Amino acid sequence: MRSFAKALTSAADAAARRRAVLAHRPRTGDTSPLYNTTRFTHGTDPSQTNSQRFIQATDPLGGTERVEFRWSTTALAATAPANQVPTGFAAYNQNLDHYNSLYWDRRAMALYPGDVSKATITHWLLYLYQSYTPVFFGHAWSTSVPHSIKRPLENRVWYAYADQNTTGSYVGSWTHPTKVARVLDDGTSQIAQATYNAQGQATTRTDPLGRQTTSVYAANGIDLVETRQTSPGVTDLLGTFASYTALHQPQTVSDAAGQTTAVTYNAFGQVLRRPRGSEMCRRG
């Protein structure tokens, strides 16, 4: 973060909208979008060296957001209550007090700064490094792939991925979840599932009610051709997509009723014209 802010002086998007990044000072950096300034502060907890890091942003109106990474903390329980673990889902319900990021939005920072119960908590999967010379030992560190997310006043949402090991604490071969599970307030469990192609595009999504959405792609595995939804005994065509641009954006979209919409874009991929007549189906 520090070296990035030192090198960056300005940034522009595809439409040439520019924002300035002011001179970086130790632990603090400023950006100036349009006519206002957002200030950033970041650092580590001296008592834990690099094991706990934080970054805090204050917008031009004084609203503050903060995110912390904590390798370990006594503020969190190591396991979730049994009634918050979904049935039918192989949840790894251990070490939840390690490898977490905590995020407080503007409201939480204004009313409950530092209150862990008011933060959105992301527990990360691990990557395991092993060496067998001269004797076995192992080191594990956190990845950027979430194991579970706990939001204030909500039950934890759990994730599973392809080719995870049996403990479920380490990352698998893919970063898109194949299962997402949670326990509702009434105690029932919900599990959604998904499959993907080699390009990472979702080919099927199955919701907790068993309805499956199937997406078919062109030979490149990127451009969506059609989307269908299947529920017990019924399969419906939701939409078709054709005439893709070099930026993989469809120029012809047809909805379930067969109504077709022609879409035009500029060189940056922004929509220039989309006549009314049918509602575009979005990629899942």
Image (cartoon, rainbow, N blue to C red):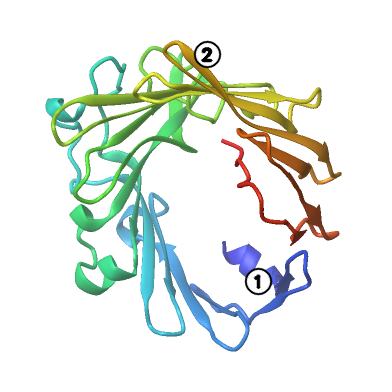
Pointer 2: residues within 10 angstroms few (<14), some, or many (20+)? few
**Residue 167 appears in the picture as rendered:** yes
* Residue 90 in the figure: left or right of residue 192: left
Q: Position of residue 163 (x, y in %)?
A: 51, 15
Amino acid carrying mark 2 in the image: Tyr
What residue do we see at 75% from left, 33% from top? 223
Q: Position of residue 216 (x, y in %)?
A: 68, 23
As displayed, is residue 31 above or below residue 179? Answer: below
Image quarter of residue 122 = top left
Q: Secondary structure at mark 2?
A: loop
Q: Secondary structure at mark 1?
A: helix
Amino acid carrying mark 1 in the image: Lys
Q: CA distance from mark 1 to mark 2?
A: 40 Å
Which residue is labeled 2 in the image?
132
Which residue is labeled 1 in the image?
6
What residue do we see at 25% from left, 74% from top? 110
Q: How many marks?
A: 2
Q: Nearer the viewer, residue 170 or 88?
A: 88
Q: Position of residue 127 (x, y in %)?
A: 49, 28
Q: Nearer the viewer, residue 240 or 186?
A: 240
Label 1 or label 2, whichever comes before in sequence order: 1
Q: Position of residue 165 (x, y in %)?
A: 44, 14
| The C terminus: image quadrant | top right
What residue do we see at 55% from left, 23% from top? 236
Image quarter of residue 272 = bottom right
As displayed, is residue 52 above or below residue 155? Answer: below
Image quarter of residue 266 = bottom right
